[in-house]
Image: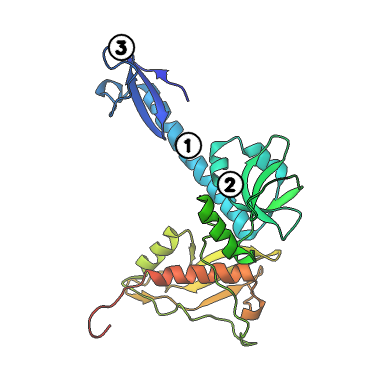
């Protein structure tokens, strides 16, 4: 955005998300100042720019959250929608360089541009820039990408940086030797915390929901919503606690056998359980 007059001898603007000022006269004319002059700190234009900066931050966070939700659930997204939001920098930053799949499920590529006409420009694994015009595209969860290793290598060559964690997202493949009656994974159980509050705080800081005695995450997988849950202790317990087992439930709250859990719900549940376990208290010394 441009510079706006503010007070006598100054102009203000948002620069890299922060309110900045520059002098309009004297030896410092046209030069951005390191700090806001005292005379400007209560100026109405400064307050308006600060509110705008806060709104832009919230908007950027909302765009990232929405794109992350599309990716985690591998939902089909209308190509026309991507074309309409591409002009918005916050949307563009969230979407650029994500792996997209159009009509051909075996041909994935990195999204580089979207035109007003609804045409997408994508760089495929052959290094070719191709133009796609499917009705919808998906931003696949990485566990569904059969060529994930190749995409990671090619991304390193291109210097790709994804704002929404996709190809470098930690994934877990579902084992093929699960017992028919198994309903719980205990791989990440037993992670000790000094307090239940600390464990709950870690869960919420990572973006997970805390409900009752559980940390949970919901994932749309295979056309249904599945919730993964990790026991974190009684809500009002103020002593030490530890992570419990990981389980999944279906849309109506029915517990699922492990064999019923889809690949995305499995990977995201394991990702949550591993992240909570990683914050545990690490004992040191001879008895550790």
Bin the neighbour count of mark 1 within 10 Å (Cα to Cα): few under 14, some 14-19, many 20 and up: few
Residue 256: horizontal and vertical position, in percent? 63, 77
Nearer-N-terminus badge (1/2): 1
Residue at which label 2 appears = 95
Looking at the image, tell me whether mark 3 or mark 2 is earlier in sequence order.
3
Identity of the residue drawn at 59% across and 85% down = 182
Query: Front-most of 270 and 7?
Result: 270
Res 25 label? 3
Please tell me in which quadrant of the rendered image residue 36 appears.
top left
41 or 24, which is in the foreground?
24
Query: Marks 2 and 3: in contact by CB < 8 Å?
Result: no
Q: Are marks 3 and 1 in contact (CB under 8 Å)?
A: no
Instruction: Tell which of 257 and 238 is nearer to you.
Output: 257
Disc 2 is placed on an element classified as helix
Q: Which mark is residue 55?
A: 1
Instruction: Name above or below for residue 232 compared with residue 73.
Output: below
């Amino acid at each position: 955005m441009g510079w706006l007059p503010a007070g006598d001898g100054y102009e203000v603007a948002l620069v890299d998300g922060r309110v900045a000022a520059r002098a309009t006269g004297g030896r410092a004319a046209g030069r951005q100042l390191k700090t806001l002059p005292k005379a400007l700190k209560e100026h109405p234009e400064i307050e308006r720019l600060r509110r705008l900066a806060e709104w832009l931050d919230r908007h950027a966070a909302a765009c990232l959250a929405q794109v992350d939700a599309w990716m985690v659930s591998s939902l089909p997204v209308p190509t026309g929608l991507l074309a309409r939001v591409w002009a918005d920098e916050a949307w563009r930053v969230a979407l650029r360089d994500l792996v997209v799949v159009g009509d051909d499920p075996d041909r994935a590529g990195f999204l580089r541009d979207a035109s007003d006409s609804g045409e997408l420009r994508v760089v495929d694994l052959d290094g070719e820039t191709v133009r796609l015009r499917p009705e919808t595209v998906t931003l696949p969860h990485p566990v569904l990408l059969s060529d994930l290793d190749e995409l990671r290598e090619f991304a390193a060559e291109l210097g790709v940086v994804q704002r929404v964690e996709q190809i470098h997202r930690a994934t877990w493949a579902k084992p093929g030797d699960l017992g028919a009656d198994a309903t719980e994974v205990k791989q990440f159980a037993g992670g000790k915390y000094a307090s239940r509050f600390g464990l709950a705080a870690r869960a919420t800081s990572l973006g997970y929901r805390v409900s009752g005695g559980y940390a949970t995450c919901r994932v749309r997988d295979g056309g249904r919503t599945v919730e993964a849950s990790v026991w974190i202790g009684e809500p009002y317990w103020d002593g030490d606690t530890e992570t419990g087992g990981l389980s999944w439930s279906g849309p109506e709250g029915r517990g699922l056998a492990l064999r019923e859990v889809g690949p995305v719900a499995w990977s995201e549940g394991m990702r949550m359980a591993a992240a909570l376990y990683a914050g545990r208290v690490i004992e040191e010394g001879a008895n550790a």
